Amino acid sequence: MLQYAESQEALKFHSGLFQGSNCSETQTSQVSSSTNAALSGYKPADWIWVELSMVAEVERVFVWQEDDLYRVVSVVNKNDEAMRDKIYERELALIESLPTFRFDFYVLPRMGNELAELVDYSTKPAYSRR
C-alpha cells in the first residue's frame, strides 16, 4: 500500500530524523520516459518518490524541501552494492530531469532494525512500500 505525504509540512526535515544511523550521501540524475509522461504537472517531490520507488529494495522515501534543495532519504533493509547502483541510477535520472533543483541524497540501510529505531516518525514518508 502506498502512503502519500499530505503536505509540505509533512515533508520538512526534523532535526531528529537521523538517530546515529549509517547513511551514505551520494552525488545527485533522466527520469524514465514512462515516469515523465505519468507525472507531468506534478510537484518535484512526487517525481522523486515515484522514481526511487522503481527500485524494488527501496522500502520508504522521505523528501523535504528547503528552497530549491530537495533532501531525500531512501530506506532499504540491507547495505548491498548492486542495489545502491540501482538507486544511484534513479538519483542521476532525477538530477538530469530536474536541472533547476539541487539534491542531497542519502541511502539509509536498516540492517534488520525497526525503522522507528532509526527515524523520528514525526516525519511522514513521501512513499512507503508497505
Image (cartoon, grey):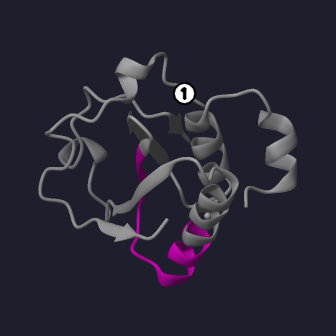
Q: Which residues are magenta?
A: 70-87
- Residue drawn at (86%, 53%) of the image: 33
Q: Position of residue 44 (x, y in %)?
A: 60, 37
**Which residue of the protein is positioned furthest toward the bottom in this rendering?**
81
Q: Is residue 81 left or right of residue 110?
A: right
Q: Is residue 70 visible?
A: yes
Which residue in the structure is indicated by mark 1? Answer: 3
Q: Position of residue 70 (x, y in %)?
A: 43, 44
Using the image, determine if residue 104 lies above or below residue 69. Answer: below
Is residue 84 shown in magenta?
yes
116 and 54: which is toward the camera: 54
Q: Secondary structure beneath disc 1?
A: loop
Using the image, determine if residue 77 lies above or below residue 98. Answer: below
Q: Position of residue 30 (x, y in %)?
A: 73, 61
Using the image, determine if residue 93 lies above or below residue 11. Answer: below
- Dividing the picture into quarters, in which one does residue 83 lie? bottom right
